[in-house]
Amino acid sequence: MVTKAPPKPKLLVLVGPTAVGKTGLSLKLAAEFSAEIISGDSMQVYRGMDIGTAKATAWERQQVPHHMIDIHEPDHPFSVAEFQDTARKLILDIASRGKLPFIVGGTGLYVESVCYDFQFSESGSDEAYREEQQAYADTFGPEALWEKLREIDPASAERLHPNDQRRIIRAMEMFHLTGERLSERLKEQKKQSPYELCIVGLTMDRALLYKRIEERIDLMLQEGLVDEVKHLMDQGYGKQYISMQGLGYKEIIDFLEGRSSWEETVYLLKRDTRRFAKRQLSWFRHMKDINWVDMTELTNSTTQFNEVHAIIADKLKFER
């Protein structure tokens, strides 16, 4: 007698660059499909970092259960392996209660690691090497360290921001210890999903997306981003923590510590966020199985919702 394999849990995923409209759409989809949202953002796990990470508001979280938000203090070294492990457990828990697990976010590696069950084999560590590279960055600046990674692993350098020193050093350390590039290891992953998977990707005309990014940053500044960063600094959280090297935080720290003017700060924040969105899109375009939906026509939200709904209903076999 042949034993039938148990059905795979359903998993809905919504990805796209910052400011493309993921949050608003995700709330409508979660209500429609009785879903619980798992944040797929590497920064929203940190308490006290609300404005700069564009977390769902308290009201939005009351409408739909959200997970992986406010689970760590900013000094915690959150990793993709921890995200993957926690998300896997959440998916099983949500599914066991008859709800649809729904990952929403823009951190490509984190989301993809769950969708396709990446294996993170340990390559060991070399603390002296890490300290040497950190000292190099402290002396010559993060851009110089990033250039060192670009020489040995250009693909990894392309997806990492120069200020993401912890992940840059880890990628360099892997090559130092094994001779293997992180980008090559990621390519070797089997990309087979343990879930009945539906991934929807949101895209938008580049000029409009950049305009929305700049408007979002202006709003964050109006809502008190500077005070949020100052409060974190008063608690002892500085740029030595990976959390405080995130977009919106490192720029404001430089302003508060007198290293940049207000005009320079706003310019750099908008420029770096545009570049971040470009890297996000580049990552997602290399992922397989994404069903793309263009959000450029903002007045057609009903049409866009219906298009996304049809994709989900088809992939996950839901009836409207």
Image: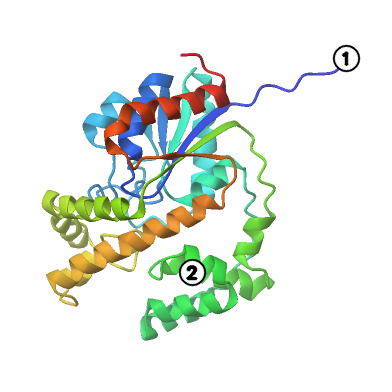
**Residue in the foreground of this view, choosing between 148 and 307:** 307
Q: Is residue 63 above or below residue 144?
A: above
Residue 208 appears in the rendering: yes
**Which colour assignment does the render follow?**
rainbow
Q: Is residue 271 above or below residue 16?
A: below
**Residue in the foreground of this view, choosing between 239 and 199:** 199
Which disc, if any, is residue 168?
Answer: 2
Task: Tell me which amino acid carries mark 1.
Answer: Met
Residue 164, by quadrant, is bottom left
* Badge 1: residue crowd in 10 Å (few <14, some 14–19, many ≥20): few
Q: List the residue tagged with mark 1.
A: 1
What percent of the width, then of the height, locates residue 77?
A: 42, 57
Judged from the image, the secondary structure of the residue bearing numbered disc 2 is helix
* For marks 2 and 1 on the same chain, the one whose residue lies earlier in the sequence: 1
What percent of the width, then of the height, locates residue 282?
A: 48, 57
Q: Are marks 2 and 1 in contact (CB under 8 Å)?
A: no
Say left or right for 139 vs 184: left
Say left or right for 277 vs 177: left
Task: Tell me which amino acid carries mark 2.
Answer: Ile
Residue in the image at 14% along x and 74% along y: 261
Residue in the image at 18% along x and 75% along y: 260
